[in-house]
Image: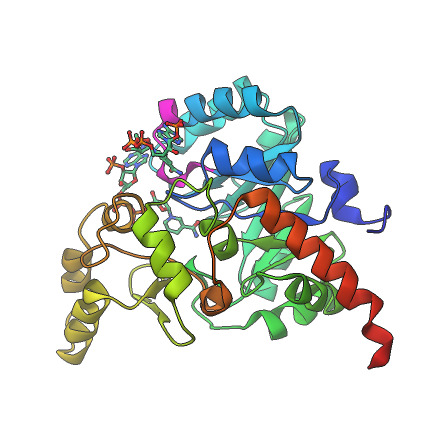
Amino acid sequence: MSTNNRITKLFNIKYPLIQAGMVWASGWKLASAVSNAGGLGIIGAGSMYPEVLKEHLLKFKKATNKPFAVNVPMLYPNVEEIMQIIIEEKVPIVFTSAGNPKTWTKFLQDHGITVVHVVSSVKFALKSQQAGVDAVVAEGFEAGGHNGRDETTSFTLIPMVKEKLDIPLIAAGGIATGRGMLAAMVLGADAVQIGSRFVASNEASSHISFKEMVVNAQEGDTKLTLKELAPVRLLKNKFFDDIQELYAKNSSKEELQQLLGRARAKKGMFEGDLVEGELEIGQISGLIKNIKPAADIVTEIIEEFEKVKSQINQF
Ligand code: NDP
Ligand code: NDP
């Protein structure tokens, strides 16, 4: 791995491999396992009440002294309180998402924190750069969970963002292997962010039934839906079918919101209700075949990356 990589230098990590912040999956256990293995672990604060985040930060720091980040979706209800904890607990890196990068970037950087913003388009990548963030994650249509409306795939998004952006670029969406990581870097990324593959890890806090469903998922088993509310890629289950039924009846946004209700994501991914819950995962789940320790996932990806890179001149 090159020692000149802009992301490994920025984050002070060994490999340009970042584990995505994921609600109900990426608590301190997963994040510390990835950071200990040489990547960047991220604690996903989107599903954590402030005191839960605090507990996770304390447990993380007992498990490792390696660099790490917290992902804060800006639509989180108690975002000010979360930011205060981040300052108090001296979190070194924050990944903001689902909001305007202007809102928190300067405040966090004034406290010595490195700021990365997650986007799904060239327009918002440039807006993030103008807001002064240190790096951008560009996430394509393949990604699981909440996503952009425009359905721009990673294969097209990464080179388009690369052409316009000066600051470091992290590719996300559809990457789960060393081969995928290399492809993203050939397209112009400095690093990759990987979510789905780490859901199928021993350390993810997701329910075992959800992890097993991810491992059994085939190509075509996920779909981006609920664009009227917040676009989200889900595994097809009864809840997904209920959404389709409402669409078939030309139902209103209010009816969709009523069906969604509250805490469906927790029900599905944390409590393991595969029938009524919201099951967020990426298209690449079709390639994920086993649940294993996060450190093994990191090693496997890096080994494949190096192997395929060494063979590339055969093309
Ligand atoms: P359990 O105590 O049965 O824990 C299930 C898994 O989640 C374990 O690996 C456990 O790790 C981990 N876990 C439990 N509590 C937390 C926490 N506060 N933060 C991070 N990981 C945790 O589940 P509970 O139903 O008792 O969980 C309590 C609450 O914690 C949940 O209702 C939820 O609000 C929150 N939580 C949020 C997570 C997220 O957003 N990623 C993840 C897990 C929990 P261990 O017990 O070894 O610390
Ligand atoms: P809901 O509004 O349906 O439910 C909120 C869930 O978050 C509940 O399960 C609740 O746990 C938990 N929670 C954690 N902290 C708080 C808090 N301070 N106030 C209220 N609830 C809290 O949300 P969803 O499940 O649909 O979404 C979960 C999160 O996903 C959102 O809060 C948001 O942060 C994130 N999100 C991220 C996006 C992105 O990054 N692009 C886009 C859209 C959403 P409990 O059930 O134990 O009360």
Q: Identify which residue is drawn at 69% across, 43% down.
A: 134
The image position of residue 295, as x and y in percent, is 60, 43
The image position of residue 262, as x and y in percent, is 20, 47
Front in this rendered view, residue 36 or 44: 36
Q: Identify which residue is drawn at 39% across, 60% down.
A: 214
User: In the image, 47: left or right of 42?
Assistant: left
Q: Is residue 214 visible?
A: yes
User: In the image, 311: left or right of 106?
Assistant: right
| The image quarter in which residue 242 lies | bottom left
The image position of residue 187, as x and y in percent, is 72, 69
Figure quadrant of the C terminus: bottom right
Q: Identify which residue is drawn at 63% across, 48% down.
A: 298
The secondary structure making up most of the magenta span is helix
Q: Quadrant of ligand 1?
A: top left
The image position of residue 289, as x and y in percent, is 47, 62
Front in this rendered view, residue 152 or 308: 308
**Number of residue marks:** 0
Q: What stretch is highlighted in magenta?
A: 44-52
Front in this rendered view, residue 287 or 248: 287
Q: Does the magenta stretch include residue 50?
A: yes
Front in this rendered view, residue 147 or 35: 35
Q: Is residue 104 visible?
A: no
Q: Does the magenta stretch include residue 153?
A: no
Which colour style is shown? rainbow
| The image quarter in which residue 63 lies | top right
Please determine whether, in this image, residue 99 is positioned above or below residue 106. below
Please determine whether, in this image, residue 53 is positioned above or below residue 77. above
